[in-house]
Image: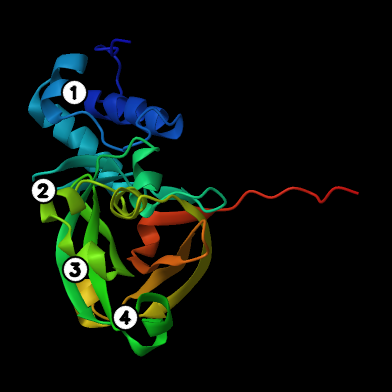
């Protein structure tokens, strides 16, 4: 739809109004990314200055976030994690269409924390990965895994979700998991990695996953920026 060029309402306000309506309609789901300035210039046949004025208006209204070198996004765009479906953390991002990647922070064999020795023995693998959406860190995942998982190639560990890695190495599927969710302060190292304020309170998802044999496959914790994440749980009335 073209703009009304003899309209007394300034061109940039017309563009801002059009974009505001599209944001409300969910036109930029699921990534939340708006078109580039050049794309908007071509779409509306206006100058870059006019486009920037429109974006500044939306920014003042709190509708968008402008990230240097990354683009313009709908403000407050949250990831929705359906916790009543058994998926790995990374899979829950990908199925929503997000540009989700993982970056290895740590992959090594360690002495097993005492609480987990009955599950993994004296040695286990520690895998820490930063979960990134649209080039923005949103969570740090820390997984304690069977010791043989420390032999993973880093490149593969950056590409495949935890459950796929475990199936490939162990030759068995994950069939169940227990999940607990809370909020707490975390060490500065973690807040720094996820780009949160030093004393920020993060969402923490703790997950224990199991093979069909009943053996524990992983003990994981995910430290999540709460403003970017939302947990969703479906429920239904019990049968009578």
In depth, the one of 88 and 217 nearer the eye is: 217
Residue, disc 1: 40
Verify CB contact (< 8 Å) between mark 3 and mark 2.
Answer: no
Verify CB contact (< 8 Å) between mark 4 and mark 1.
Answer: no
* Disc nearer the start of the sequence (1/3): 1
CA gap between label 4 and label 2 equals 28 Å
From this viewpoint, is residue 227 visible? yes
CA gap between label 4 and label 1 equals 41 Å
Rendering coords of residue 187 (x, y %): 26, 83
Q: Residue at x 21, y 40 (%)?
A: 72
Q: Which mark is residue 186?
A: 4
Q: Which mark is residue 68?
A: 2
Is label 4 or label 2 in front? 4
Rendering coords of residue 199 (x, y %): 29, 81
Question: Could you tell whether 77 is left or right of 39 in the image?
Answer: right
Residue 70: quarter of image: top left
Q: Secondary structure at mark 2?
A: loop
Residue 187, compared with residue 83, is above or below; it is below
Is label 1 or label 2 in front? 2
Residue 125, compared with residue 163, is above or below; it is below
Q: Which mark is residue 193?
A: 3
CA gap between label 1 and label 3 equals 34 Å
Residue 123: quarter of image: bottom left
* Disc nearer the start of the sequence (4/1): 1
Q: Residue at x 24, y 12 (%)?
A: 5
In depth, the one of 44 and 134 nearer the eye is: 134
Question: Could you tell whether 236 is left or right of 133 in the image?
Answer: right
Label 3 Cα neighbours within 10 Å, binned few <14 / some 14-19 / many ≥20: some
């Amino acid at each position: 739809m073209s703009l009304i060029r003899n309209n007394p309402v300034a061109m940039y306000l017309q563009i801002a109004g059009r974009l505001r309506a599209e944001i409300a309609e969910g036109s930029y789901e699921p990534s939340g990314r708006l078109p580039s300035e050049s794309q908007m210039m071509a779409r509306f046949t206006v100058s870059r200055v006019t486009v920037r004025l429109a974006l500044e208006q939306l920014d003042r209204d709190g509708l968008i976030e402008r990230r240097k070198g990354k683009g313009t996004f709908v403000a407050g765009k949250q990831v929705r994690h359906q916790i009543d479906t058994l998926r790995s953390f990374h899979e829950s991002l990908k199925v929503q269409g997000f540009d989700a990647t993982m970056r290895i922070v740590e992959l090594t064999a360690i002495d097993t924390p005492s609480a987990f020795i009955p599950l993994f023995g004296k040695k286990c693998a520690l895998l820490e990965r930063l979960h990134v959406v649209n080039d923005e860190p949103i969570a740090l995942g820390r997984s304690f895994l069977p010791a043989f998982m420390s032999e993973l190639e880093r490149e593969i560990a950056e590409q495949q979700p935890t459950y796929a890695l475990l199936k490939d190495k162990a030759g068995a599927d994950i069939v169940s998991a227990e999940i607990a969710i809370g909020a707490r302060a975390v060490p500065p190292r973690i807040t720094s990695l996820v780009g949160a304020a030093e004393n920020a309170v993060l969402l923490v998802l703790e997950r224990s996953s199991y093979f069909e044999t009943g053996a524990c496959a992983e003990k994981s914790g995910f430290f999540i920026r709460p403003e970017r994440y939302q947990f969703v749980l479906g429920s239904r009335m019990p049968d009578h």
